[in-house]
Image: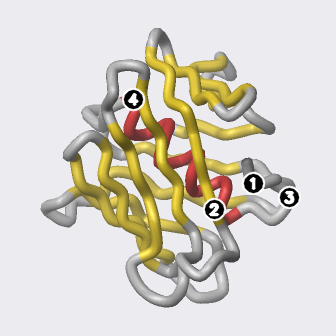
């Protein structure tokens, strides 16, 4: 299944909006996450989302570069690895190393998400892919 971030909207394969970001708030269904992010600081890229229920979602780089990112979504752990140093395509892996999705940033600022495992928690998917858009798409403004 192919999903896509276009501007600040996550679209399902039929083009329906399933998540959106407005004024630093990621909305997916009834869930809301306040999003904070930083790039270019000593720490480098980090994104954090806090839900209205108090659940915390974080994503940041593992080493000196953004080649490998780690995400913790309310205790669920993920790794995002670039498939090549020259492409902005990532593999989304769960804690056991199973590939859940492929995420590809476009020069246009859009982000394509090829989902392989429908069991991926929808809020996790929305947070992780939006954070990927922040770090991997050159035309997106940081919030």
Query: Looking at the picture, does residue 64 appear above or below residue 110?
Result: below
Which residue corresponds to mark 4?
122
Label whose residue precedes the other's in the sequence (3 or 2): 2
- Of labels 3 and 1, the one closer to you: 1
> What residue is shown at x 57% (from left), y 52% (from top)?
131
Label whose residue precedes the other's in the sequence (3 or 4): 4
Measuring from the top left, give residue 128's x and y in whole percent: 47, 48
Q: How is the image coloured?
A: secondary structure
Which residue corresponds to mark 1?
142
Nearer-the-camera pick, 106 or 138: 138
- Of labels 3 and 2, the one closer to you: 2
Which residue corresponds to mark 2?
38
Query: Looking at the picture, does residue 43 appear above or below residue 104?
Result: below
Local packing at callout 2 (Cα closer than 10 Å; few below 14, some 14-19, many 20+) is: some
For the question of whether residue 13 can be seen, the reply is no
How far apart in space, not on screen, are marks 2 and 1 (Cα)?
7 Å
For the question of whether residue 24 can be seen, the reply is yes
Element type at mark 2: strand
Element type at mark 3: loop
> What residue is shown at x 18% (from left), y 60% (from top)?
95
Local packing at callout 4 (Cα closer than 10 Å; few below 14, some 14-19, many 20+) is: some
Residue 107 shown left or right of residue 42 in the figure? right
Query: Looking at the picture, does residue 1 appear above or below residue 89?
Result: above
Element type at mark 1: loop
- Of labels 2 and 4, the one closer to you: 2
> What residue is shown at x 58% (from left), y 57% (from top)?
132
Dot 2 and dot 1 residues touching (CB under 8 Å): yes
């Amino acid at each position: 299944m192919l999903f896509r971030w276009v501007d600040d909207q996550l679209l399902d394969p039929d083009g329906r909006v399933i998540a959106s970001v407005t004024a630093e708030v990621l909305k997916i269904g009834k869930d809301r996450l306040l999003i904070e992010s930083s790039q270019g600081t000593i720490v480098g890229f980090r994104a954090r989302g806090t839900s209205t229920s108090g659940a915390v979602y974080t994503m940041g780089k593992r080493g000196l570069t953004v080649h490998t990112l780690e995400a913790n979504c309310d205790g669920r752990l993920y790794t995002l690895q670039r498939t090549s140093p020259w492409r902005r395509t990532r593999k989304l892996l769960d804690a056991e190393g199973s590939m859940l999705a492929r995420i590809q940033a476009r020069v246009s600022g859009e982000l394509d998400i090829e989902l392989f495992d429908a069991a991926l928690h929808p809020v996790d998917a929305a947070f992780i892919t939006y954070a990927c858009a922040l770090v991997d798409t050159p035309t997106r403004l940081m919030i």
